[in-house]
Amino acid sequence: MPRPLPLTLALAAAAAAALPLAGAQTIAQTTASAPAPAPAAFSLAPLPYAPEALEPVIDAETMRIHHGKHHQAYVDNLNKAVAADPALAGQTLEQLVARAGTLPAAIRNNAGGHWNHTFFWETMAPTDKVGAMSMELAEAIEAQFGSLDKFQAAFRAAGTARFGSGWVWLIVGADGKLAITSTPNQDNPLMDVAEVKGTPILGNDVWEHAYYLKWQNRRADYLDGWWKVVDWSKVSARYAAATNGG
Ligand SMILES: [Fe+2]
């Protein structure tokens, strides 16, 4: 006489057996009566760490306002602008960014703001959790800029030279080489309008809202201090992806 299945296995088997039927019902209901689904709205992901986790480089209040107010506003305004133009329904953030120059300013600014800030939060980590730079990226930085110190000095120079608000980036260009570039407002190097195009692997926000509470007008000091919270393992992974595995 066969032994009965343990309860958990029996439940799993029953659930698996029920899946095709449940799926069929869902499809039937969708095709029979459900209206076309509304386009998915863009949404703000939570910060990948606590607001105070990047102190003392970036203070908790700046993080809360920057993420919860500024970034949220880019997301909300992007959703409003997309909802107002049916031709944009279903476009991904990357698609909107890539053709930003052909779209209204509200899309360019807010799609850029959403993409840039998402990238920015993911670039950073608490100082005791930042990972190491890969050998491939370290060699590429040395080959292109001479040394890590020289690269960081050039990055600071590009960040301080950006008049008004904008971003400073480390990109992989179409030639596979690293380059530093800067963009105004919420533009980025993925946009069709960028003067220097490429795949960003590192980016810093040099809008005053990113640093003013802690650093006031000392943008150069903010740029220097920021290296303590750059997660080089993340940047290295992006470099590997941008160069097809290095
Ligand atoms: Fe910002």
Image: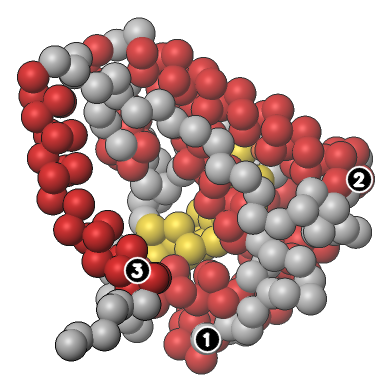
Quadrant of the rendering where the N terminus is positioned? bottom left
Q: Of the residues under marks 3 and 2, which one precedes in the sequence?
A: 2
Name above or below for residue 163 compared with residue 31.
below
Q: At numbered mark 1, what does the secondary structure look like: helix, strand or loop?
A: loop
In screen coordinates, is 157 left or right of 33? right
Residue at 70% in and 33% down: 68
Mark 1 = which residue?
134
The residue wearing badge 3 is: 242
At 26% across and 85% down in the image, what residue appears? Answer: 3
Which of the two discs, 3 and 1, labels the residue nearer the N terminus? 1
Residue 159 in view of the camera: yes
Identify residue type, mark 1.
Ser
Mark 2 sits on what residue?
214
Identify residue type, mark 2: Lys
Between the residue at mark 1 and the residue at mark 2, the CA separation in whole angstroms equals: 31 Å
| Residue located 60% across and 60% down the image | 123
Q: Is residue 240 above or below residue 192?
A: below
Q: Tags 3 and 1 in contact by the CB under 8 Å rule?
A: no
Q: Position of residue 115 (x, y in %)?
A: 48, 41
Mark 3 Cα shell of 10 Å, populated few (<14), some (14-19), many (≥20): some
- Distance of label 3 from label 1 (alpha carbons): 14 Å
Query: Ligand 1 is in which quadrant of the figure?
Result: top right
- In which quadrant is the C terminus drawn? bottom left
x, y percent for residue 20: 13, 50
